[in-house]
Amino acid sequence: MKIPKVTLFLFLLPSLALIFIFGLYPVVYNVFLSLKDVNLITYIRGTSKDVGSLNYRAILGDSLFWRALYNTIVFTLLSIVLQMVVGFLLALLFYYEFPLKGFLQALVMVPWVMPIMVSGSFFRWFLNDNGFLNNLLATFGWITEPVRWITLERVVIYSLTAVNVWLGIPFNFILLYTGMQQIPEELYESADIDGAAGWQKVLYIALPMLKPVLVATFVLGCILTFKVFDLVWIVTRGGPGGASHLLSTLSYSLAFDRFQFGKSAAVLVLMQIIVILFVGFSTRIRLEER
């Protein structure tokens, strides 16, 4: 029996309504908000005025925004590269059978199952000036003064990146490990017959066969890392002096610390533009490779 097109469209209506309400409407409203002078008073009174591109010009002229953008790029790229390298090495290790393999695999997944509030609170204590890490290093006599892991402006973003690498390793590991299971065993057996060394099998078999998985892992990882908020907010709240702000934490701080909702919305719009450009660029590269 042929179902009328109108009936098919009616079946789609609930999904389309959800996409519009929870996906499209917030994005459009955020753009609308970024063009207004909205603060706590004007928001409550409903007297906000249109200011055109003033919020964008103010944001782009603020050194804190450029610092947050720099931090976001450094945080994202370093995290992804290190997570993928460690995840790939772990996938190689667990590709082979050895004692306690299952137990060690479970340990690798621990960061993934821990609530971010617990992880963030732990590392805030662990990396504090008087925290566990400094006390441990002092006990072995490796430092004479506490290292300011999260209170020194030029160091804090790298400390947060290291924490994020630890949190993201399971995601990269599980994708790459699953991808390696799909590589035909015959390829490795043929390489063994030809006398290929271990590194040659990795370089000429594993990596080329994993290319689609590597690309997907890189794109997903960049998008997920670019919007990280909770970890940084829990550990440093963007401090000291805004030195560890990412674009996400800067937007939150503008909205709920300074009540500058218009500028906060402008930061989010700029973030969306960057993500859209990145996804479009990566999609184009993948299509050209096909």
Image (cartoon, grey):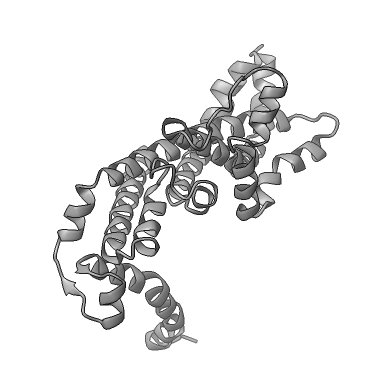
| Residue 151, percent from left and from top | 49, 37
Examine the rendered structure and indicate whether residue 41 appears above or below residue 268. Answer: below
- The reply, left or right, for residue 88 in relation to residue 252 is right
Query: Which one is nearer the viewer's eye here, 161 or 153?
Result: 153
Q: Eyeballing the image, is 15 above or below 132?
A: below
Q: Which of 54 and 31 lies nearest the eye of the viewer?
A: 54
| 143 sits to left or right of 240 | right
Residue farthest toward the right in the current orientation of the protein = 99
- Residue 290 in view: no
Image location of residue 154, percent across then percent down: 42, 31
Task: Decide: is 150 above or below 277.
Answer: above
Rendering coords of residue 216 (x, y %)? 48, 44
Tag count: 0
Q: Position of residue 273 (x, y in %)?
A: 28, 53
> In which quadrant of the rendered image does the C terminus lie?
top left
Q: Is 189 displayed left or right of 225 in the figure?
A: right
Query: Which quadrant would residue 93 be assigned to in this image?
Result: top right
Residue 256 in which image quadrant: bottom left
- Residue found at x 15% / y 60%: 53
**192 vs 253: above or below:** above
- Could you tell me which residue is drawn at 46 percent across and 84 percent down? 11
Taking the spot 19% from the left edge, 47% from the top edge, the residue there is 61
On the question of residue 2 being in view, the answer is yes
Q: Quadrant of residue 72?
A: top left
Residue that lies at the very extreme toward the top in this rendered image: 195
